[in-house]
Amino acid sequence: MSSRRAGSSRTRGRDLAHEVKHFGGLTKHLKKIIFDSNHCLTELKTSGHFDEEIMSTLVLPPEADDVVGKVTKNPPALVIFGQTYTSKATLINKIFREDLFQIVDDSDNKKTWRAVHLKYGSQRNTRLTLTNSFELLNEESGSPVMRNSWTGIPRLEMLVKEEHHKDTCMLSATTEATLNHPLLQSKLQILVTPHNCPGIAISQAYNVCTNNVLPVLLYCFDKDELSEDNLRDLQELQNCAGTLPILFVDCREPSEPVVANRERRLVEDANEDFDEDSAYDTDERIEVERERHCGLGARLRRRCRPTPNQRPSITDQLFRAGFINIPEENGRIRGVLDVFTIVNQVEDLFNSIAIVQFIRRSLQYYLIRCCTAMHDLHQHCMNLFITTAFDMQRDILVTPKRIEYARQRENELFDSLKDLTNQKQEQLRNLIQSTVADMTEDLLEQAGNYRFTDLEVSHEGKIQSQKDIKRCTEQIQDLVLARLNACVVEKLIGSVELLRESFLGTLQRCLESLEKIDGDLETSTSVALRQILNAAYQVEVNVRTSSSVVRIIWERMKEFFQSIKPFKTPTRVDTEWKRKVAQTMINNLDESKLAKSICSQFRARLNNSHESFSTSLRQLEQKHSGRLEKTEEQRMKVRKVYAPRLARLALESTSLRDMVLYGMPKLEREIGRGQYGVVYSCRSWGGVTHCAVKSVVPPDDKHWNDLAMEFHYTRSIAEHDRIVALIGSVIDHGYGGMGCSPAVLLLMERMQRDLHTAIKANMELPERLQVALDVAEGVRYLHSLGLVHRDIKLKNVLLDKHDRGKITDLGFCKPEAMMSGSIVGTPIHMAPELFSGKYDNSVDTYAFGILLWYVCAGHVKLPQAFEQCANKDHLWTSVKKGVRPERLRPQFDDASWNLMKSCWAGEPCERPLLGEVQSKLQDIYTKAKVKRDAEGGGPTQQNHTCRSDTL
């Protein structure tokens, strides 16, 4: 019994002032997180790494921003509503343990009382103020000296006389009182709403009293039942409060002191084991509080069942009206109260555990909303960083390949078109010859019906001028050549169109993707490509290129002699003359020369277009080279600076939220120790029993960043059977005292042992192979999320009570886009390409092959090939030269040995995908299990207490 009373006395030491101070300490951490977040985002906006559209999303939503602003700028305040002025006065006097308010009789409850604002001050003082802080002079208050010399707040300072009811200033004024009291010194303010003020509704009083403060709402009553007006006021108050909880306090004088004392003892006993130095809620505290809360629910249920002919109690009225919710018998206590609550009147409300718990949970409500809002913002930023890093890395890798692809495909197109012209010359000659033979009559008919343009011809069709005759001849010749040219080019284009279908689609899309990045060269390469394909359309056939040299000379001599012939008669350009000119043109055609001319023109235009394309592509490559250098610089900045900073802020905001919800975990015995931390057992935390707590004290910013990134990636992974779940985190800022780095506590599900220990304890082969299958499944899941573990080994595989494996320790786990090429991992499990700095997720396949060697070997000794290496450098050199673990007989059959060798192949491209590995390993496991069953064996009892060693 003495220990119970001692526990109760420790609990009474945690009064209202203590809770408010504790809230202030947590708020300081929250303000620092918000300040650092704003500073980081401002720096990010000015860096130019992201466009304005993306940066506009990196802000808090308006509602969350409003809550964060209120919590960081406004002090907490108890806002007291009540059924009567007497109930409010009673509540204030119980909290301060002195008669600050005069207790009045029922007649005074009908009078008008203004709002009272209690604040901290070195001396007691009162004044009347308006909402804008202007002070009003009350002629009846006396001199300032008289106003300071009071024990309780003067009645005249709070009472509104009837003659002042029409004076808006006097009616809406607030009595502001300053007191030197520990509760107010903790920066808590108390506001008592006005009573019976005409024209001032509950909603107006709520808005005035909750302005510029963090309200903690209390409603006190001192009557046996609520009137209709009281219920309407409560409904209006509930509408204003929204999701804010309200505490109903019974301020009636207890008719049975024994019952009241019993109720007080119940409250004290329910909290007797609470440690004064513990955080908000330990697991034992949650369990005791749940039992107490369920007991309270049972009592409330009994009270809410009025007997026949019995008037309903005030508790029954509140319950029926929906203002309070009775907890279920097995209901779980939430981290923040989101239901209305009622407590019985107790003598000392300053130390009342009911009031203390309610204020704690109300302040938790604000902290958790802020921490959640900041966590969501940090998570959004981290997701944006990872997505951007992926896009940047893809751009860096793909752009040079696109340029090389465009160059290669254009060269193939150019060579194909050149070959086409060489092959088509003889075909064109034959084509022209057959075309002329087929089209002669049609051409002569069209020439005979041709009407000359831009020439004056007499009605008889006679032309005197040799110049006009020459123009007529040229027009007839152009007509013939145009028809012939169209026919020949159409045949040539048909062959080119086949190449267009083969080359243009993918190549054109590739060029468009390259050109849209740089506006100055938006169409230059695409235009050059189109010119290559359109070279066939631009072939021209004229008289010089279509006739033989002898015939050209003969025609010119005929024209010369005709021009000097005296008394030349006018030429009649009729249908016969037109047909004759056309026939002469057809007779003078040289098919070989015409075909050669067409191909020559096509090649010349093709060469020009090819040179133009190559030049523009080189310019485009130079532009992209400079841009990609800048992109790589931005990627490294995001990966090394902004992502770790935001990850650390995300860790701090999440840890603060977990701290508020579940408190500091109680560390028990040490169960493991590594290079960067110590692992302790924890009975329960956050509603989860049998936890493991990894305590890490980062010595510098680099370790902080690594830990924050590990936390982010682990926390962002959805729950999976093959990955050890991260439950939460807490930062112990008081670790080591002033000037020391805080300790980060990562809480994870508790496992039985690791694979290293299990192999040492002679776990049988089928069970070991089952664990290997679990590891393959877990690694496949990480790869599906774009993550690379980079440290797969025996110690990082934990076993549950059913000897099923789960992967842990994601300290080196990162997305491929966020990896910098750093050399990380355990030496004997590291793939050769890790030392070059350029690697992908196939390094996990290599490490799995080494792990499979241990699984099949059945021991944890180093392979002989590795044991002979004097140091890490010697080991790495040997691995790069192709040294691998030796084959053990009879442990390794052909299937398992071949699977190992394929996993640790020197070339990453030669390693199988983990899905293929898992399929082959399943067959090996099935055969091993069948063999053991055939031999009549079974799994042996494993030694789960064997301690693990470090590789």
Image (cartoon, rainbow, N blue to C red):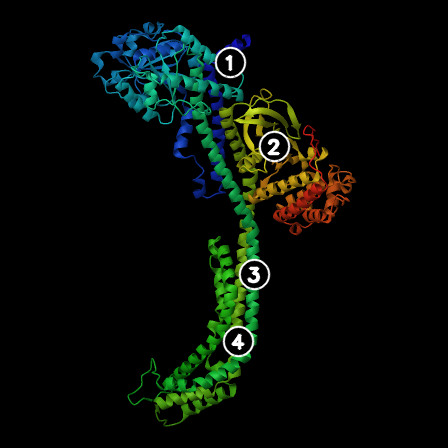
The answer to which image quadrant residue 622 occupies is bottom right
Q: CA distance from mark 1 to mark 2?
A: 41 Å
C-beta proximity under 8 Å, tags 1 and 3: no
Q: Position of residue 381 (x, y in %)?
A: 49, 38
Viewer-side residue, 608 vs 177: 177
- Disc ID at residue 272: 1
Q: Circle 2 — which element?
A: helix
Circle 2 or circle 3, nearest the eye: 2
Q: Nearer the viewer, residue 804 or 719?
A: 804
Q: Which residue is mark 2?
A: 703
Residue that mark 4 sits on:
599
Q: Residues within 10 Å of mark 3 (few under 14, many from 20)?
A: some
How many numbered dots are placed on residues in this image? 4
Circles 4 and 1 in contact, beta carbons < 8 Å = no
Kind of residue indicated by mark 3: Arg
Left or right: 752 as drawn, with respect to 224: right
- Looking at the image, is mark 1 or mark 2 earlier in the sequence? 1
Most distant residue in the bottom direction? 567
Mark 1: secondary structure: loop
Which mark, residue 407? 3
Question: From the viewer's perspective, is the residue at label 2 or at label 4 nearer?
Answer: 2
User: Disc 2 versus disc 4: distance between alpha carbons?
Assistant: 70 Å
